[in-house]
Image (cartoon, rainbow, N blue to C red):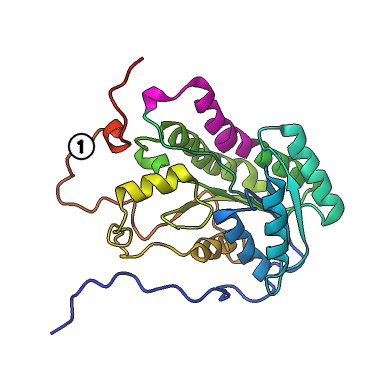
């Protein structure tokens, strides 16, 4: 009789393995925003492993310096530079591209990973809190994308963009109204610009991560995760495991590679089916305020 004990999806290949041929990105320049920490750094590492020259951008110079040193030591990596940048400032974004071009050349690939987020009931969000998340996650992503697109259009060269999204762009995100709205805009940019810029050789895709625990998770997100699932992270995933950050990096390197040139306007969800409904009957509704341990709303 067939063994039907649930075992989940198999573990990924080990760190250092690559799905693409060695040197796939040799001679290519890859710009990763938010590349100094977390998933952005993990994505940058997989491009480095395939020979890319890297530009990592972020707001904290110490984190960028440490990441730059680590990425330069990845086997197969090309040159690695770092740029302090608040992507909400279009003039600073342009300066980063100027510096990248002078040092390495016009970036061939852009990974829009930088974002901001924290959990909150929607009614508690102040105007400044809303702006802080939307201005980084959506407007900042647009400023970097616009700069990349305009330079390639002017030069008549092809390029590839990967926007890091979130599954609540489709489903809604209780407790994350600001981020969900911004990520819905990021997803729509993928679909809109794929049509506008495809005739000029610029492809754009989205990439949605599931649960990829890493050392740089914010205290708010880590605390919420521990509160919701302190001992059962794996059991709460249909895959019966969480993701390894390198798995997201492998997906990003494929989407931007020569092997995915006819894939554009698409958003790939890499989350072990965690965003899909998995119950015959929906669980009881627990208000967001209760889930976050907040008391009654007081205006």
Q: Height in image: 109 above or below 114?
A: below
State the residue in front, 61 or 103: 61
Question: In the picture provided, is 29 more to the left or to the right than 131?
Answer: right
Q: Magenta segment, principal secondary structure?
A: helix
Give the residue number, with chain letter if any, for mark 1: 285
- The quarter holding residue 23 reads bottom right
**Magenta span:** 122-142
Question: In the picture provided, is 167 more to the left or to the right than 114?
Answer: left
- The percent position of residue 157, horizontal first and vertical second, equals 76, 52
Residue located at (42% from left, 54% from top): 210
Residue 289 in view: yes
Looking at the image, the residue that sits furthest to the left is 1
State the residue in front, 122 or 299: 299
Magenta stretch holds residue 138: yes
State the residue in front, 151 or 43: 43
Residue located at (30% from left, 33% from top): 288
- The percent position of residue 240, horizontal first and vertical second, equals 30, 65
């Amino acid at each position: 009789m067939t063994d039907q004990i649930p075992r989940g999806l198999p573990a990924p290949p080990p760190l250092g393995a690559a799905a693409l041929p060695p040197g796939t990105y040799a001679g290519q320049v890859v710009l990763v925003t938010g590349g100094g920490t977390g998933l952005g750094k993990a994505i940058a590492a997989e491009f480095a492993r395939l020979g890319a020259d890297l530009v990592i951008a972020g707001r904290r110079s110490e984190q960028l310096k440490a990441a730059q040193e680590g990425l330069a030591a990845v086997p197969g990596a090309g040159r690695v530079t770092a740029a302090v940048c608040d992507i909400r400032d279009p003039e600073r974004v342009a300066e980063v591209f100027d510096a990248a071009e002078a040092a390495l050349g016009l970036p061939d690939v852009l990974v829009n990973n930088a974002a901001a987020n924290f959990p909150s009931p929607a009614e508690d969000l102040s105007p400044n809190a809303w702006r802080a998340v939307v201005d980084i996650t959506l407007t900042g992503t647009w400023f970097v994308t616009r700069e990349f697109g305009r330079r390639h259009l002017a030069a008549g060269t092809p390029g590839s963009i990967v926007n890091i999204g979130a599954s609540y762009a489709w489903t809604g995100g209780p407790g994350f109204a600001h981020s969900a709205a911004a990520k819905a805009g990021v997803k729509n940019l993928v679909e809109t610009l794929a049509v506008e810029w495809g005739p000029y050789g610029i492809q754009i895709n989205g990439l949605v991560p599931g649960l990829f625990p890493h050392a740089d998770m914010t205290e708010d997100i880590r605390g919420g995760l521990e509160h919701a699932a302190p001992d059962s992270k794996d059991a709460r995933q249909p895959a019966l495991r969480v993701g390894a950050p390198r798995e997201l990096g492998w997906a990003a390197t494929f989407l931007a590679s020569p092997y995915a040139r006819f894939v554009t306007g698409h958003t790939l969800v890499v989350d072990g089916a965690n965003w899909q409904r998995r119950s015959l009957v929906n669980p009881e509704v627990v208000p967001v305020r209760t889930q976050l341990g907040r008391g009654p709303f007081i205006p």
